[in-house]
Amino acid sequence: MQLKYIDEFRDPGLARRVVDSIRTLWGDRPPMRLMEVCGTHTVSIARGGIRPLLDGAVTMVSGPGCPVCVTPDGYIDAAIGLGKRPGTVIATFGDMLRVPGSFSSLEKERGQGIDVRILYSPLDAVEIAAGSPEKEVVFLGVGFETTAPSIAGAILSATERKMKNFSVLSSVRTIPLAMEVLVSDPEVRIEGFLCPAHVSTIIGSDAYLPLAKKFGVPCVVAGFEPLDILYGIYLLLRQKKRGVAAVENEYSRVATPSGNRKALDIIAKVFRECDIAWRGIGVLPRTGLAIAESYAAFDAQRKFGVEIPFAEEKTACRCGDVLKGKITPRECPLFGKACTPGEPYGPCMVSSEGTCAAYYKYGVQ
Amino acid sequence: MTGEKILLSHGEGGKRTRELIRKIIAKRFENPILSPLFDSGLLGRLDGEIAFTTDGYVVTPAIFPGGDIGRLAVCGTLNDLSVCGARPVAISCALILEEGFPVQMLETILDSMKAAAAEGNVVVACGDTKVVEKGSADGIFITTSGVGIASDGWRPAPENVRPGDRIVLTGTMGDHQAAVLIARNRLELAAEILSDVAPLSSMLLDVLSAFGGSVRFMRDPTRGGVGVSLNEMAESSRVRIVLDESRLPVAEAVRGICEILGFDPIYLANEGKALLIVDGKSADPIVETLRKTRYGRNATVIGEVTDGSPGVLMKTVIGGLRAVDYPVGDQLPRIC
């Protein structure tokens, strides 16, 4: 199997030229404060060693775009509660396993007997339900606009097959309005957004127009390869230098201005907008996707009368401030001491896309 | 014996057990030490420091592209001896079979054990066979132990490593784990990925005898891959290792599967590769020598030992620098 265009986006010579262009463009101005919203960008920046390359020109702060990290402990508690019902299978993406709830995690509870199955696609959960009619299968629907269509697809498939033993505990979130909250927070001080690649393939780059217009903040949709990121940063600096705030799309090879119509339609069909709590950030109005009335039979919350509380317990963990970009992981007193990937305390250390995990794993001491 | 299955009575010590051992197992490994079927294999007098190692093999599926659990069980133990500079003398073979395991599959696995032992120039000196009830094992588990003799002169060891040394990898990373992952998940891919499982004893011992003290330290990067082995080497040698990302060899197909599934090939297991830390001045001739061998064709220098606090760093392709740490909490499937 030949995957094309991997090396092209990691070309050392081109990378050097973009870095040089950034230096020439920016000169000795004070560093521009940029947020990469998405966890995959965070990991790619850390893996590529990009931060030290651009030291002085930009300050990269990591945003809340890791779905596992922003899932509140109340959701984990609810999932554990469902898992304890006799005959229930909890189906989930692997990253959720070690996320701490308020008293336990799915990994610990699995050791105590909860039936937790790890899978790659929500459709696999439908198949498990079809294959074991005596079981009740609950899929943990965690993710952003990227994952929402496949969760919606699973619900539609279960509807078609008239299944009675499949449901989704939805914790799906949407990105653009959350970015508005972040940009209006004076403590976060964001001067530009590196917008997510995958999410933008679904919602389209035009989704960020209101953000750029209303808040005068430059936005660039960029791919996840090192050169995508470097060039995306170059475009953000260029906007700032020219004093404009527009939406530019570096990732035009995949993301279009209007996004993926089919995916957006299926999301609109199965979900409805709702207020939702983001771990460490609090409740953000209209940034959640709950399962729509017509598919209530597949909504685990309605089916089992589950409440997911908004309030969170206060701890020394500063994931909330990390998720908002207020501090870097190293400024958290627990980082690398009480909180490591082996013994994670907060969600940003748990997920492979978490900011703290990326800093810990790839950071040069 | 087409279609025949392993039965519990094959493990009960009676006639069936004798038949299984004599006709199927011992027949293949025939040699003067094993063949009397005493309670121990008598190895005779061994001259030199004796190296002794053991490993259990539980890979699923038992037969995978490029090899099987039998070849793996022999090569793994041979390689563990060789990286310590020991010439393999004899290995043991303990089989745990699950009731219902196809006899024909067992024969295939034993045949490849025989071939690997012959290639590694080692005898199977003793063995054991147990059968457990269906559900108590997954088809077949194999444990091999090995005895080797370390050369009298130079011994590769962590304390020999110093700044200026270079890191040599004998070939591409991750082939074994990628092959097993694909076989396990029945992923349909255009190009076939074969496990690299291979006995490295003659290649490594030849390099050692030709270059002696220039070969500072060796490891075989199995579970956890090159990333974990290098971290362990840096830790035990108390040195800093700096890798050059652009020089890390990865087969095109393996890279593709890693991109798709989100794996980093540096953490994928190898079963036919060795990491050598060598004197900087001898690195090129050592790589030349390795490249002339069957299992070292793609050998290359991937980094160097530098001053600084112990650990592993990587110069990234685009010119950045980052840490290469131990992986944590990854779901580790049974790969070896």
Image (cartoon, grey):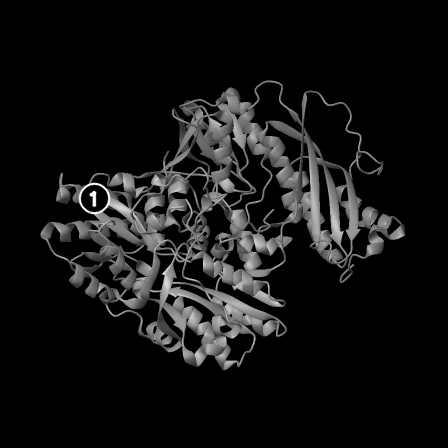
Residue A128 can be seen, yes or no: no
Kind of residue at badge 1: Arg
* Mark 1 surroundings: few (<14), some (14-19) or many (≥20) residues within 10 A: few
Q: Closest to the observer: A191 or B34?
A: A191
User: What residue did someone put label 1 on?
Assistant: A17
Residue A223 in percent (x, y) is at 29, 56
Q: Is residue B306 above or below residue A179?
A: above
Residue furthest to the left = A242
Left or right, A109 with respect to A340, comes to: right
Which image quarter: residue A249? bottom left
Where residue A187 sits: x, y (%)? 24, 49
* Residue pictured at 51% horizontal, 41% vertical: B225
From the top left corner, tell me how far across and down residue A156 is, in percent: 45, 77
Residue A335 seen in the current view: yes
Q: Quadrant of the N terminus of chain A?
A: bottom left
Farthest residue toward the right? B15
Which chain is home to disc 1? A
Is residue B14 found left or right of B82 in the rendered image? right
Q: Residue at x 59, y 28 (%)?
A: B84
Quarter of the picture containing the C terminus of chain A is: top left
Residue drawn at 32 percent across, 46 percent down:
A45
Q: Is B112 located above or below residue B292 in the figure? A: below
Up-down: is B146 above or below B134? above
Say which of B85 and A292 sits in front. Answer: A292
